Image: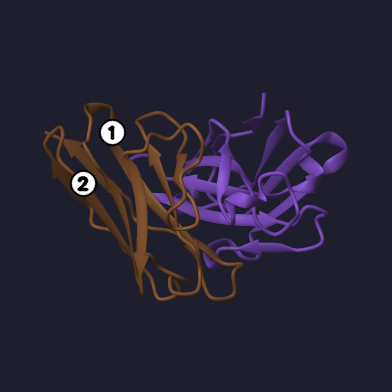
Amino acid sequence: EVQLVESGGGLVQPGGSLRLSCAASGFMFRSYWMTWVRQVPGKGLQWVATIKQDGSEEFYVDSVKGRFTISRDNAKNSLYLQMRSLGAEDAAVYYCARYTGGAVVPTDFLGDAFDIWGQGTMVTVSS
Amino acid sequence: SYELTQPPSVSVSPGQTAKITCSGDALPKQFAYWYHQKPGQAPVLVIYKDSERPSGIPERFSGSGSGTTVTLTISGVQAEDEADYYCQSADSSGTYWAFGGGTRLTVL
C-alpha cells in the first residue's frame, strides 16, 4: 500500500525550532519529488516546500524562505522539514505529499499533481 | 508569489450541477488540479491536467479551462460530495506552486 506517515509535530515556543518527518512506503520514494503542504485548522491549503528526487534542488513559498529547510534521505525513504524561527503564523497541520511532476515515474501521466497525502501532523506555536 | 482565486462557497440541491471556478494568471500555461477535502481528512485528487479524472473518481466530476479560469463541474451532486474543494497550479516558472483559497460545497 502506498503510504505517507508524518511525525514530529507538537507544541513549540515562538522563535523555536521543530523538525518534521515523513516516512514513505509502498512506492519508489527515490524517484519522486516530494512536497510539504500546510493548513491552518479551518483555513485553506498552502504549499510550503518541494524537493527534487535526488535532493539537488529545493523550492519554497516566500513566507518560509530562510527559515525552513526541506530535505530527504532516500536510503531511509524519509522526507524532512526543519523549521526555525517559528511564529504564530506557522501553526498548522503539516502534510507531506508525493508530487507526480518533475521526473519520469509511473504516475507522471498525472502531470504536476500532489497525488498521495499523509494524514498530517499538527504544529502549535505558543508560549 | 502566485495566487489562485476561488469563490468561498457554492450551494446546490441534490441532483443539480455545481460549478466551482478558479482564476489565475498562469492558467493558460499551466495545468490545474482539483482536490476535495472532507473534515478531518487529507485532500484527495479529483481532477488532473485541467480535465482528466483519476481512477476511482466518479464520472460526475469533470473539469474544463478557458484562458485564466478553470472550472470544476459536479453533475448530479450527491450528499457525499459536500466538502471543501481546492484548485492547485503553478506559476509560469512551474516551480512555485499555489492552492486556491478553497470553496465549500454545501448540498442543501
Answer with left or right where residue A30 lies relative to residue A14: right
Q: In the rendered structure, the residue with mark 2 lies on which chain?
A: B
Q: Is residue A22 above or below residue A30?
A: above
Chain given the colour purple: A
Disc nearer the start of the sequence (1/2): 2
Q: Is residue B56 above or below residue B36?
A: above
Instruction: Give the image location of residue A40, x and y in percent.
Output: 41, 45
Residue B18, which numbered label?
2
Nearest the eye: A7 or B15: B15
Question: Label 1 amino acid?
Answer: Asp
Q: Is residue A23 above or below residue B48?
A: above
Residue in the picture at 74% in, 34% down = A27
Instruction: Give the image location of residue A76, x and y in percent.
Output: 84, 35
User: Residue at label 1?
Assistant: B81
Q: Are marks 1 and 2 in contact (CB under 8 Å)?
A: yes
Quadrant including the N terminus of chain A: top right
Tell me if I can see residue A7 in this picture: yes
Question: Label 2 amino acid?
Answer: Ala
- The local secondary structure at tag 1 comes to helix
